[in-house]
Image (cartoon, grey):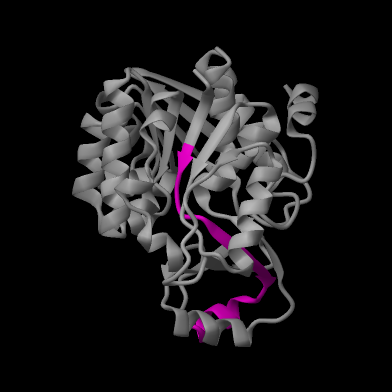
């Protein structure tokens, strides 16, 4: 395969700033969740936040960035506009060595951005304007790219816009026809609520590798018992990697449930991208032939680093860091 992992997702630039809980309440925002907003609402919120840091983001793009830093061969499909934020996104992902040649839009909505509001406990609350992302469609899915990627990694957020959903389905069909695997991140508990029945069908019939956090998995299976949820997902897809916060993660393969302890973190700064980078560590191990327990440990180590600084992208040589800590 030319690529270990191809990511398909919303190409977004993150705008990160610190706020307090009172600010979230004043904006009627659910702490720790992602809310979709229109351009007017996004601009109004931007006017009320303080000093901010801009950096490329997007769930699947963060995972691909992490994989590239770890040394995996990667590619990405995502829609941007020919504007300032689009130029930032394109530069950042290509600078990591990621193959990215999705056609840039010359008209229509601007490049997407996500305002990431980080509270003192390092929790992040997100308000996302999808912008150009809503125009990602089946024509943007490069068939040869999917055929030449061992794993195609999709973010659950893609299931919101109809055109992106069709791109999602096209990529799954191409990958499986070529004998390759599909990985899916559930992305957000509210995303699961919006599309629960469809997500259950995807997990049971179309997804080979599932990524979720504890709340997302509990929501998917309508239970408050994580062991029950783990057993159910083990019956539905080949591999499930479930993050459990500070407790670490659980990796499910059929009836086997492997629990891997978390990595102690003393300087927690920002949880943005923790799940994305967990997926990067896990998929890197998987494509390099590591056993599932090692894959889970690699995911924990990489996620443990990313939450020690602002932003969802690695700021160090992740390959060297992983080698020193596994």
231 relative to 128, above or below: above
Magenta stretch: residue 15 in it? Answer: yes
- Measuring from the top left, give residue 141's x and y in whole percent: 37, 42
42 relative to 238, above or below: below
285 relative to 168, above or below: above
Magenta stretch: residue 299 in it? Answer: no
Is 208 situated left or right of 53 in this image?
left
Q: Is any part of residue 220 visible from this angle?
A: yes
- Measuring from the top left, give residue 256's x and y in whole percent: 38, 17
Say which quarter of the image contains residue 35.
bottom left
39 or 311, nearer to the observer? 39
78 relative to 246, above or below: below
- Identify the residue at horizontal 65%, vertical 34% (top origin): 68
- Identify the residue at horizontal 43%, vertical 50% (top origin): 187
Quadrant location, the C terminus? top right
- Tell me which segment is drawn in magenta: 7-27
- Measuring from the top left, give residue 293's x and y in whole percent: 54, 18
Is 308 situated left or right of 23 in this image?
right
- Measuring from the top left, give residue 178's x and y in whole percent: 32, 20
Report the number of numbered marks.
0
- Identify the residue at horizontal 44%, vertical 31% (top origin): 145
18 or 7, nearer to the observer? 7
């Amino acid at each position: 395969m030319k690529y270990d992992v191809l990511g398909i997702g919303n190409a977004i630039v993150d705008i990160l700033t610190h706020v307090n809980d009172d600010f979230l309440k004043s904006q009627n925002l659910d702490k720790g969740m992602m809310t979709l907003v229109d351009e007017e609402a996004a601009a109004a919120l931007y006017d009320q936040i303080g000093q901010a840091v801009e950096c490329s983001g997007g769930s699947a793009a963060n995972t691909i960035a992490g994989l590239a830093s770890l040394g995996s061969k990667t590619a990405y499909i995502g829609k941007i506009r020919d504007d300032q934020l689009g130029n930032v996104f394109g530069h950042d992902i290509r600078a990591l060595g990621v193959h990215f040649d999705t056609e840039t839009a010359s008209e229509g909505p601007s490049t997407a951005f996500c305002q990431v509001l980080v509270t003192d406990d390092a929790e992040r609350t997100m308000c996302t304007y999808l912008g150009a992302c809503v125009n990602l469609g089946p024509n943007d899915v490069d068939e040869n790219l999917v055929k030449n990627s061992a794993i195609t990694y999709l973010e659950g957020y893609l299931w919101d816009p109809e055109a992106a959903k069709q791109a999602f389905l096209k990529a799954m069909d191409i990958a499986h026809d070529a004998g390759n695997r599909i990985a899916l991140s559930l992305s957000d508990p509210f995303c699961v609520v919006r599309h629960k029945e469809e997500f259950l069908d995807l997990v049971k019939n179309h997804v080979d590798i599932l990524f979720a956090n504890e709340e997302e998995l509990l929501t998917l299976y309508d239970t408050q018992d994580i062991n029950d949820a783990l057993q159910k997902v083990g019956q539905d897809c080949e591999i499930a990697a479930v993050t459990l916060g500070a407790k670490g993660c659980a990796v499910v393969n059929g009836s086997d449930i492997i629990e891997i302890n978390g990595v102690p973190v003393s300087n927690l700064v920002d949880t943005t991208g923790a799940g994305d980078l967990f997926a990067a560590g896990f998929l890197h191990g998987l494509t390099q032939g590591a056993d599932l327990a090692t894959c889970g440990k690699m995911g924990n180590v990489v996620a443990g680093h990313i939450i020690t600084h602002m932003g969802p992208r690695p700021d160090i040589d992740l390959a060297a860091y992983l080698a020193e800590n596994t």
